[in-house]
Image (cartoon, helix red, strand yellow):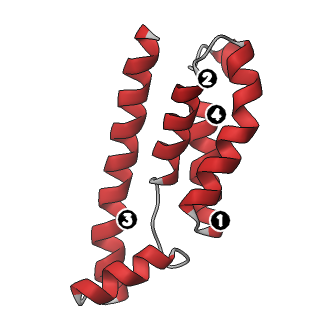
Amino acid sequence: MVINLGLPFILIPFVISALLKVVQGSGTVSVITAATLSAPIGTQLGLDPILIFLASGAGARACCHVNDSYFWVYTNCMGFDMKTGLKTLSISNIFMSLGGLLATYIASLWL
């Protein structure tokens, strides 16, 4: 489906990882699951497994909210209420995630 649309395959592990992170909160589980699901197909398409892992890692940074333990550590250590924590941490993580996806896409052009 992604191939037929002309989109790069690295979006698949990115989206899987981001969705898992939002739903269950663990970045580690998100990265491992997305990379494990995407690696067999990606390698058959000629994509370097490291790029699949990097895209999964970028996706796992996509959202940090109340079901993530790091959110509460960050919020309490900074002395923020929940609303301020959501504004600061979640928005900065979106930019980190998109930056990681962009860097992975640029790297995929050479690998």
Q: Position of residue 49 (x, y in %)?
A: 60, 25
Mark 1 surroundings within 10 Å by alpha-carbon count, few (fewer than 14), some (14 through 19), many (20 or more):
few
Q: Which residue is mark 2?
A: 9
Q: Which residue is mark 4?
A: 12
CA–CA distance in space, label 4 to label 2: 6 Å
In this rendering, would 22 be left or right of 72? right
Task: Identify the image quadrant of residue 23.
Answer: bottom right
Instruction: Determine whether the residue tagged by mark 2 lies in a helix, strand or loop.
Output: loop
Q: Are marks 4 and 2 in contact (CB under 8 Å)?
A: yes
Disc 2: CA contacts within 10 A as few (<14), some (14-19) or many (>=20): many
Q: Which mark is residue 90?
A: 3
Label 4 sits on what residue type?
Ile
Looking at the picture, which amino acid does disc 1 mark? Val
Is residue 15 or residue 73 the one in the foreground?
Answer: 73
Q: Secondary structure at mark 3?
A: helix
Which quadrant would the N terminus be assigned to in this image?
top right
Upstream in sequence: badge 2 or badge 1: 2
Residue type of the residue flagged with mark 2: Phe
Task: Name the spot of residue 58 as percent of width and height, x first.
Answer: 46, 44
Callout 3, which amino acid? Ser
SS at circle 4: helix
- C-alpha separation, residue under disc 2 versus residue under disc 3: 25 Å
**Residue nearest the observer in this picture, 87 or 62:** 62
Is 111 situated left or right of 24 in this image?
Answer: left
Q: Residue at x 64, y 33 (%)?
A: 12
The residue under the point 75% across, 38% down is 37
Please give the residue where the numbered disc 1 appears in the rendered image.
Answer: 23
Quarter-of-image position of residue 72: bottom left
Identify the residue shown where x is 32% and y is 89%.
Answer: 76
